[in-house]
Amino acid sequence: MTTPAPDGVITIDDMHLGIPQIIATYLLTGDEPALVDPGPDSTLPALEAGLAAQGLGLGDIRSILLTHIHLDHAGATGSILARNPHVKIYVHTIGAPHIIDPSRLLKSANQLYGEMMETLWGTTVPVPSESVVTLEGGEMLDLGGRTIHVFDAPGHAKHHVIYLDQQSGGAFIGDNGGVRLPELPFARPATPPPDIDLEAWDGTLLMLDELMPSWLMLTHFGAYADVESHLSDFRTRLAHWGEYVRKGMESGASEEEQLAALWQLVAQESAGLSQEVQDALIRQTGALASSWHGLARYWRKRASA
Ligand SMILES: [Zn+2]
């Protein structure tokens, strides 16, 4: 099956835990092949298989563009560098220290995933600092004649950037546009701790709207050409989730009750979808509890600011 994507971009399914359409890596083809979000170390064999299908190997990759440093997007970076030390790594300046020394990142992931860490993400190895190019937004990258515009894009994480590929009109938005499956008309928020910022996120979505890309490229999962409706629906949905969690916190209900209420909201939004699609969406989003915690943390931070 070929997944639709803009010209010059190949979608590689990283087959996370053997399951399709959870994590995508994008291959930018051309004289200097590049990857957007190589995925976790655990899915490196699937990434290599996807590259092989294009007649390429890790040794051909010249650059890796990280939208942000969460393990499901960036965990394989160090392992790839160990195999090909010539790859340049582009990453937000706030995220860079945590791929060079991933100990803090791994510690917080460990709190979330515990003994599932190795199964989910494999082994995350440090990235040598000399391979890292830091970004703040506003840069223009030249990848073998291919121009990529970089935008600071906080919301899902404060170290998130968006890459706009001038050639294809594709905007690689990481997790800032939520998670979506190709057969669905809408995206669902994924809002894990620690640095969800709804206000900043809304600004990022408005900026994206103004950029008017031809495609939205989601890591979870795929390329979407219904840019305007995706963005406006997602903006509304994200705000609604935020308000829902805020009101739950104000109500004095227990954490369990609030989480159950969020499940109810998800059930309402998913009405009419098959059980299979609903399960697939939940897998993509990660635990719903983690989304609740991320939003609750945002509101607590705001209250104490
Ligand atoms: Zn993600």
Image: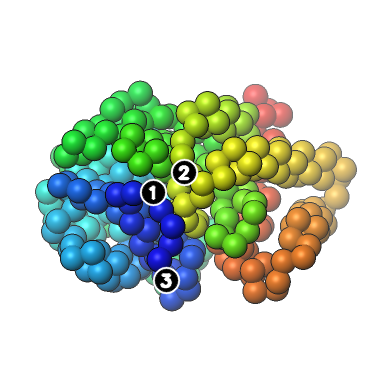
Q: Residues within 10 Å of mark 3 (few under 14, many from 20)?
A: few
| Distance from Cα at disc 2 to Cα at disc 3 | 20 Å
Q: What residue type is labelled 1?
A: Pro
The image position of residue 115, as x and y in percent, is 47, 70
Look at 27% across and 57% down and name the residue there: 125
- Find disc 2 in the rendering and name its residue: 215
- Is label 3's Cβ within 8 Å of ligand 1? no
- Image disc number at residue 83: none
Q: Are marks 2 and 3 in contact (CB under 8 Å)?
A: no
Q: Earlier in the sequence, mark 2 or mark 3?
A: 3
Q: Earlier in the sequence, mark 2 or mark 1?
A: 1
Q: Do the residues labelled 1 and 3 touch (CB within 8 Å)?
A: no
Q: Which amino acid does label 3 sit on?
A: Met
- Is label 1's Cβ within 8 Å of ligand 1? no
- Find disc 1 in the rendering and name its residue: 6
Q: Earlier in the sequence, mark 1 or mark 3?
A: 3
- The N terminus appears in which quarter of the rendering? bottom left
- The C terminus appears in which quarter of the rendering? top right
- Find disc 3 in the rendering and name its residue: 1
